[in-house]
Amino acid sequence: MYPSAIQNYEAPDSVDGAMAAIAKFGDDAHFIAGGQSLMQAIKSRIIQPETLVDLQNVDELRSLEMAQGVTIGAMVRYRDIAANAGLDGRLGALRDAASHVGDRQVRSRGTIGGSLCWNFVSACMPTVTLALDPRLTLGSEARGRREVGIRDFLGEPMETDRQEDELLISIFFPEAAGRHGSAYGKWSLLTDGLPVIGVCAAVSLDDDNKCTSARVSVGGLETGPVRFKRAEEELLGAGFDDLKSHEGAISAAAEEAEIFDDITGDAEFRRQLIRSVGLKSIVKAFERAAAAGADQ
Amino acid sequence: MTGHTGTGIGASLPRLEDLPLLLGKGKYFADLKRPGQLHVFFFRSIHAHAKIKSIDTRQAEELPGVVAVVTGEMIKDELLPLPQPSVTADLPGRKPTFWPLAVNKVIFHGEPVVAVVAEDPYVAEDALELIDVDYEPLPYVGDMEAALDPASPIVHEGWDSNQIFHIDFHSDRSESEHKDYVKRVAELIETAPHVIKQRYRVHRCGVTPMEPRGVLAEWDDTDGLMVWITSQRPHVDRYVFADVMSLPVSKVRVVAPVDQGGGFGVKAAIYREPMLITYLARKLGRPVRWLETREENLMTVGQERDQIHDLELAADENGKIIAARDMGMADAGDGCAGMYWGYNMPLVGAARFPNAFDIPFCEVQMRVAVTNKAVLSPARGLGIYPTRFALDRAIDMMARKIGMEPSDLRRKNLITELPAKLSTGITYDSGDFRKTYDRLIELADLPAFRKEQEAARKEGRYIGFGIGVGAEPSGVHSRRYIVNTGTPAYAATDVRIDHRGGVTVYYGDAPHGQSHKTVIAQIVSTELGVPPEHVTVIHGDTQSTPYSTGTVAARGASLVMSSVAVACRDLRKKMIRVFAHDHKADPDYSDYEFADGQVRHKRSDNLRSGFAELAYRIIVNSIDLPPGETGSLEQKAVFENDFGMVAFSAHGAFVEVCAKTGRVKILKYITSDDAGTVLNPQILVGQIEGGVIQGISNFLFEEYVYDENGQQLSSSLANYKIASAADVPAIDVYHDAGTYCPNTPLGARAMGEGCIGAVPGALGNAISDALQPFGVEIVETPVTPAKILRMIRG
Amino acid sequence: MKRDVTITINGVEYSGNIPIRMLLVDFIRDVAGLTGTHVGCTFEGQCGACTIHLNGEAVKSCLLLAVQCHGKEITTVEGLAREGALHVLQEEFHRHHALQCGYCTSGMLMNAAEFITERPDADDEEIRHALVGNICRCTGYTNIIKAISAAAKRNASV
Ligand SMILES: Cc1cc2nc3c(=O)[nH]c(=O)nc-3n(C[C@H](O)[C@H](O)[C@H](O)COP(=O)(O)OP(=O)(O)OC[C@H]3O[C@@H](n4cnc5c(N)ncnc54)[C@H](O)[C@@H]3O)c2cc1C
Ligand code: FES
Ligand code: FES
């Protein structure tokens, strides 16, 4: 209900300041971004921070740049992503996810960086980024900046490659020539809830509208989000409107996946959701990629 | 559906309650502060069933800001446990003895074990982390059926079984008559051409209000105990506090705040925590406050339904029901809640089992077990949700078996002759069930739907239609209510006119969203001809209002509003007598009307007086009155009906079930309701819409979940899933096929409580109808997508 | 452990030397004494009863610390009516009977107040979607949707 006592609160206004603050206060210091996950943990006292380093004043983390690829600052909010019409086609999945996380109020606070660093087992952004394959920039006072790919960043659920003193600075989606599309969809019992299953698909098409690369990630599994290699392989060469192959690809992958039962659903139910949510995401990703071609 | 444009009965008068609430100036419990108040947090059991070996509170006591740390051992000789006489009159069944804090052992996950009192709520919560309790786990009793097995471990020390209640409804049959009756039921079922034999189950869910509970108590050596409490029953609370603290009732004043954030039954029972808070206030000599967290709320109160029905339904070739046998079973949790004791709900549900149906021979039994769960406690549609589900589902299954359209079979079996008495002894006073039902059928346009359904199936879309009905209580009567809760049912109001013609209505209940202020003002406006703004309503304060059981059990439009009308009518008569006397006119009551702030003779224009002037004449200038007449315009009226009144509803749900994800989408939901005289159409519709959505949310989303060790897994709103606006449809409410209720002075029937009853039947039937191509019959709730897919897979 | 915090609420500055851990909603209710903002959750931030505006945006005040809002301006339900005139939403909630117990109402109003300026043309389904973060236990939502829709239309036509 109420947080346990907090000793220090800092609100630096620069990336260096943020890295310095976390270094200074050490182990029991936590960054707070939108607070939409961290505050839940603090109020239920699962986390009892000695120090909070608030990132809200660090303008650099709020920027979203679209030059030579897209760079999204860690503090860019769901709300900003959902409203950014520039994030279409190739990065359409980001907007699909961002516009359906939680509710309006959560989207006005919650950030992409916070979601990735929290890496909650069924959260949307880890699943989406796993398929979009960005590179992340992290920084610490002691060791400076470094880059890491999303696959290496996301660990087991609630774990990441981020070291205690590291700040996630930005998420970079390199420019890519060609025709690409991505889409994300999720299923939860109540509208816009944490997904029971979320599926992100990202595909590229050649001039004949045949698939040249595909990445499919599935969230909601006990393991955290995973890539569905089988589906990706089967999609290669599939036509953009070849519903049968799309369906076959996701079904085959769903069949193979290791899935558990829990109170939100049995394994067979999840498999079925992967098929139906997955197919929708795949079809939409293909459509977006095909439309990208139409512009050129 | 907006009623006429006036301000009296029947108008959709915008609510008088609204303005402060819209401005953020409501006066809810949590908004109240007393100087020097202390805050309580509870340390609660992490086990479902365990012996308490030791409790170490030393560190917590030493934490700066902590004023007291108390345990069950410390309090058990200083205040009396429940049950107490205030809440047990004539109650059947067992009543476990319990104190506010666990003594010796804990019996559910979430039971209060230690209470910390501190200067600051944040500090009180800090202290919880410093308490150490050593437990010895005991076997968890979590399944109601297994709990009733003689071999089961026992929940309550000293009991020889876990059965807390059993009833075999006799109505007025003697023991030997009943024996024959039961035999006849068995024969009929055995020889009937068509029988449905099925187990139906409704899960644990309820209607947790948005505002959690709270208690603030203050002790004064002269005045005694003052308690502010979120409550639907301040007067009953008052008697209980007096009982457990051994105080004269006159030394206890209880106030339920003017504004309460919903109750739906949850705030109607007598729970552990308030008794402890009142005790602490006296013990510590300072105001003591406890504000429930949502977690505590979800873990301890509002868990309802949770019944199993083994039902046999028999019909003849033509679909006329000839007999039924319903063997019910329910899970009372630990049974530790005053008034309800975990079994009142299943008792009521079973008593009302036959619903609106004419079942010539109907045997009903209900067995209730205690388990290591939170107590089963009241929720809107008290007890009936599971029984409605069972019978309404069985009727559709029967229709399919016979090859009839379910809506025809249902119609055929509706009770047509009223008043009626059910085989369980329940009575219905009046109404025209078929008329109200036929209106629904007309609105639903079934032939068109069946065509649409066929076409949809060809496209692989599964749509379905289902009906549920409810013959629900419209106010209860004391003969029944005393047996159910240990308190009487009558409504008592005190209507006082002041010398400027203002009217203040005092009554002892505690509304929490029902719009009583507005409706009472409308009734006074109609009866006395004053504008609604001149009416003030005082409720919830035991110091100023007459004793009455509370805002529960559909007592609003039926009993409370009736008592207001009766009191107003008595006042009218007195005013007419004095007026006629002063003007040497004939005091024939029917010759006078009260309107536009005037009292006037209908036929002589010069015989009139301002309402305020006449009030002044009688209250202040109280000389030269008619012989035998006294001054003052204050009238108390008590209203009750010795015969059960009824309000009938028929609901129709159109759904589409996605065969890929199992998702149920409600396409359209229609209700046809008999509310009798509609006092305020907008408010009536609002009540029904709210109740129906609660019923839908219960059916599809909400569930209190216990794991195999009795750990509660639904203690936050992230896990106990309540429908948001995006999860539910709009509801089309019709009340144009109702019937005047001859047994209330205004002809009104109460709808607020019972309107949820028809929901589970309507939804269960609609979903089953949609899934007929897969042969699916819904017999268990909640109906989640995962379950639907499993059933489709077969 | 404590900080001097000043927050402007509905145009009025409120200051206090408060513990860092104090929730914004407690600052609003206990320090500023504005009790129109309600609490319905333990920690989960699901009910929306505590919704206020921070920088003009609807957010949940139970998921913020008061120190995070030092020097900032927030609006609560008490600040919705201006100079004695009700906000269109307050009028339409009244007209459409969009509240029963009133406990969820402040949060509903605050969320909707931002939403209707952002999306004056929203249809019923979009309005329902915008209200996912606010639970109402009493009304069944239909009248709330009607009220918001009517208010949005009136707002747009001004
Ligand atoms: C009602 C509700 C519904 C929700 N529904 C969904 C949903 O449907 N789908 C979904 O995916 N999520 C959902 N969420 C979670 C939401 O997405 C959170 O916003 C998100 O997980 C965390 O982002 P944040 O900015 O709020 O981070 P915070 O909560 O502030 O921080 C989360 C963690 O990340 C760390 N951190 C944050 N930023 C950085 C940084 N730049 N560098 C290093 N560490 C950092 C923090 O220290 C903390 O450990 C919901 C939350 C709520 C309250
Ligand atoms: S109290 Fe903030 S969302 Fe419920
Ligand atoms: S009006 Fe009671 S919760 Fe919405």
Image (tube, coloured by chain):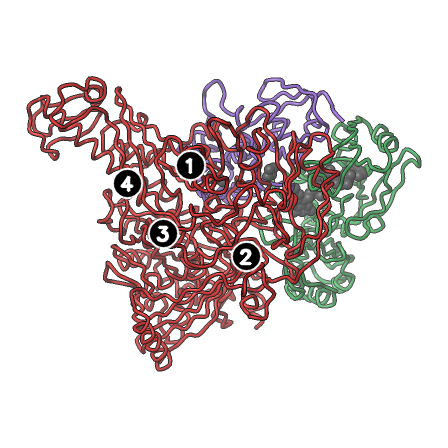
Q: Could you say where residue C65 lies in the image, as x and y percent from the top left?
A: 69, 31
Which residue lies under the disc numbered 2? B333
* Residue at image mark 4: B638
Q: Amino acid at mark 3?
A: Tyr
Could you tell me the amino acid type at mark 1?
Val
Between the residue at mark 4 and the residue at mark 1, the CA separation in whole angstroms equals: 21 Å
Q: Which residue is mark 3?
A: B481
Q: Chain of mark 3?
A: B
Front-lying residue, B626 or B772: B626
Residue at 59% over, 28% down: B37
Determine whether A58 is above or below C124 in the image.
above
Tag count: 4
Residue at the farthest bottom position: B191
Quadrant of the picture in which ligand 2 is shown: top right
Q: Quadrant of residue B678?
A: top left
Q: Is residue A96 at least partly visible in the picture?
A: no
Sequence-earlier tag: 4 or 1: 1
Task: Identify the secondary structure beneath mark 2.
Answer: loop
Q: Is residue A84 left or right of residue B570?
A: right
From the rendered image, report the letter of the chain displayed in purple. Answer: C
Which image quadrant: the N terminus of chain B?
top left
Mark 3 or mark 1, earlier in chain = 1
Comes first in the chain, label 3 or label 2: 2
| Mark 1 to mark 2 CA distance (whole Å) | 31 Å
Q: Quick check: is the Cβ at mark 1 less than 8 Å away from ligand 3?
A: no
